[in-house]
């Protein structure tokens, strides 16, 4: 974000609305070349707003801050430098880590090298404007060429790196549209409930609707949480309210809804000075006990990662949106646990920028990073920025739990296929849907990595390839990550889908066999009933005959006459069952053959008549 940057790297980003990583200038003052036209959502480790707007307006280098009523007075250089503390100090490290876990945190700045690191947090807008005027070496006397910071000016950064207007609006309007879509969804549900209950809208509902209608004004005038809680802000930006209202156009909301509801949606913007990757990243769901099985797909949060031509790394994160708190669990504790899980990747990077964090994580070999290595003799700005970009991108630890959960779900379905099969179809459908979603998501991750490391991927009109923006070590790590995603995730998911398909085929084969056995039993039962009716029909006739009182005959009937007749008729009926069954089988086959011959003869006659008619018509034509 400076006119010339040769050794500094700004990094930032963590959390609720957008968090930003960017490079600092080493030999000249940082300048904001283009004043933004729209306000930016506030940024920070845990900013309170899902899309709150602070109304920061960038100051042109030639325009003093005091002449712009929208910009607060710039903090003095001495006051700003006094806010930086030694990040390798255990007490400072603990305070910063706790701050990063606080949902109300606003921002932080970390400047570090292999041997030194300093941090400041909770900076004001005036602090940021002063910070952008300072080279990165100023804060630590040239010993910390890398800066990791979160700040509130999205459009200023977008203007400097020539972000497209669509990309800038997508970033700062992401949470605004998410809030608006949720508000409309809740309003529609409440309206449907009121219609079903035949109750008119009361005054409270009307007041709520009125409040929702002015939501853009509240967002512009202050900060807003994910639940719509507005916080005060002294910035005066009412002239820009119309720009916020414009984003709620139907086509804009439809586009944002498509992007936010689709788990496997990814975006990749490439221009002359940057490449921006946006995707959904998964985080672990807090563990809880429930009879209902949780979804295989972990909760998601959206992030953008930007790699710029001056080795600047910028990251934007959406606000924190939580899963529904399970029954019996404290809502505050549940959200705190999920927030920590949501920020685990960023917190891992933040911890290991301090020697205290490196000491804490020295035995956690799966979480170790190589961004900062105290005692290293040589330090490369390209390696530092590239490694940071890689470790921010490498945020798929929540995916490992998917493998165990998928196997458990398949084992459960396999067990149920031998026991109760009443709900097997819904379980198979749900499992297939979730595995497909995860397969598409990791396939998109793999494709994005492929485009990042491809030597043929041209980023700009100047034909600057990604190979020149990523160090060799980072490119190797990306290739390794691509292989891991294929072997650990995609191949395993494919195996699970094949196993699911095999279980599904087995289940349907079992159902077909059961249906066949049931049909066979019904056929045998019907045949037995038919034979019994044939057997007892003559006996019933004989019994009816003996029960008729015929003069001069009834007196001659004796017991022996009845039972003798019964024995003869029963024997004849029993023998007739087998005889007529064979006769009927023979007759049915004979009738089938006769019917087939008659059908062929009929078709032949019809065809002969048609041919005769055609010949007659041809003869007439010849005449």
Image: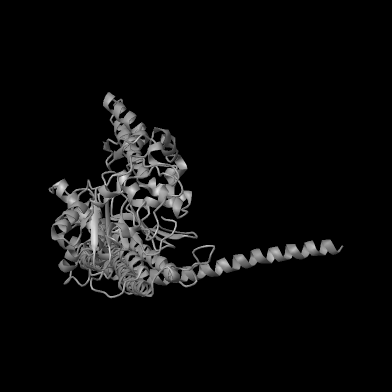
Name the residue rendered at 24%, 59% in the picture.
118
With respect to residue 483, does 258 lie above or below?
Answer: above
Q: Is residue 527 visible?
A: no
In x, y percent, where is residue 160? 45, 53
In x, y percent, where is residue 471? 38, 72
Name the image colouring. one colour
In x, y percent, where is residue 171? 39, 49
Q: Is residue 360 visible?
A: yes
In x, y percent, where is residue 315? 35, 56
Q: Outermost residue toward the right?
A: 623
Determine whether, in the image, residue 58 is placed left or right of residue 621: left
Quadrant containing the C terminus is bottom right
With respect to residue 567, does 46 lie above or below?
Answer: above
Quadrant containing the N terminus is bottom left
Front residue of 594 and 463: 463
Determine whether, in the image, residue 324 is placed left or right of residue 200: left
Front residue of 556 and 62: 62
Front residue of 289 and 611: 289
């Amino acid at each position: 974000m400076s006119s010339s940057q040769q050794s500094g790297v700004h990094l930032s980003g963590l959390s609720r609305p957008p968090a930003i990583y960017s490079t600092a200038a080493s030999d000249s003052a940082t300048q904001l070349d283009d004043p933004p036209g729209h306000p930016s959502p506030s940024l920070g480790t845990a900013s309170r707003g899902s899309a709150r707007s602070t109304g920061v307006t960038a100051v042109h280098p030639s325009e003093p801050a005091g002449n712009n009523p929208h910009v607060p007075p710039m903090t003095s250089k001495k006051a700003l430098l006094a806010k930086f503390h030694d990040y390798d100090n255990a007490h400072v490290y603990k305070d910063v880590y706790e701050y990063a876990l606080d949902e109300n945190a606003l921002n932080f700045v970390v400047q570090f090298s292999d041997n030194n690191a300093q941090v400041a947090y909770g900076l004001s807008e005036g602090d940021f404007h002063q910070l952008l005027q300072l080279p990165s070496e100023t804060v630590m006397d040239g010993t910390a060429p890398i800066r990791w910071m979160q700040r509130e000016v999205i459009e200023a950064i977008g203007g400097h790196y020539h972000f497209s207007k669509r990309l800038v609006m997508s970033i700062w309007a992401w949470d605004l549209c998410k809030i608006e879509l949720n508000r409309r969804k809740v309003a529609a549900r409440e309206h449907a409930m009121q219609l079903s209950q035949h109750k008119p809208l009361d005054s409270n509902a009307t007041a709520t609707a009125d409040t929702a209608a002015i939501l853009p004004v509240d967002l512009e005038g202050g900060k807003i949480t994910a639940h719509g809680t507005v916080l005060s802000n002294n910035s005066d930006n009412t002239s820009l309210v119309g720009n916020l209202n414009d984003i709620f156009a139907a086509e804009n909301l439809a586009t944002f809804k498509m992007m936010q509801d689709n788990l496997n949606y990814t975006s990749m913007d490439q221009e002359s000075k940057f490449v921006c990757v946006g995707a959904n990243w998964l985080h672990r769901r807090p563990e809880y006990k429930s009879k209902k099985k949780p979804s295989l797909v972990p909760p998601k949060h959206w992030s953008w990662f930007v790699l710029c031509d001056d080795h600047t790394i910028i990251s934007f994160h959406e606000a924190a949106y939580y899963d529904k708190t399970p029954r019996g669990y404290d809502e505050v504790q549940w959200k705190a646990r999920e927030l920590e899980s949501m920020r685990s990747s960023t917190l891992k990077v933040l911890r290991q920028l301090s020697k205290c964090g490196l000491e804490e994580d020295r035995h956690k070999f799966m979480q170790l990073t190589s961004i900062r290595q105290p005692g290293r003799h040589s330090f490369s700005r390209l390696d530092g920025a590239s490694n940071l970009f890689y470790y921010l991108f490498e945020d798929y630890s929540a995916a490992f739990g998917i493998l165990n959960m998928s196997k458990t779900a398949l084992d459960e379905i396999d067990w149920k296929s031998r026991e109760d099969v009443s709900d097997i179809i819904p379980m198979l459908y749900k499992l297939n849907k979730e595995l497909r979603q995860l397969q598409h998501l990791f396939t998109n991750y793999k494709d994005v990595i492929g485009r990042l490391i491809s030597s043929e991927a041209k980023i700009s009109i100047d034909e600057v390839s990604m190979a020149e923006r990523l160090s060799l070590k980072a490119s190797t790590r990306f290739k390794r990550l691509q292989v891991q995603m294929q072997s650990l995730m995609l191949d395993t998911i494919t195996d699970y889908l094949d196993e699911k398909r095999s279980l599904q085929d087995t289940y349907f084969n079992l159902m077909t066999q059961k249906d066949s056995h049931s049909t066979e039993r019904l056929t045998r039962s019907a045949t037995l009933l038919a034979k019994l009716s044939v057997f007892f029909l003559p006996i019933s006739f004989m019994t009816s005959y003996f029960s008729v009182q015929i003069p001069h005959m009834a007196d001659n009937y004796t017991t022996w006459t009845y039972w003798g007749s019964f024995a003869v008729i029963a024997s004849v009926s029993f023998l007739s069952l087998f005889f007529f069954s064979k006769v009927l089988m023979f007759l049915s086959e004979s009738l089938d053959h006769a019917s087939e011959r008659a059908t062929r003869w009929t078709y032949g006659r019809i065809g002969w008549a048609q041919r005769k008619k055609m010949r007659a018509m041809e003869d007439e034509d010849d005449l």
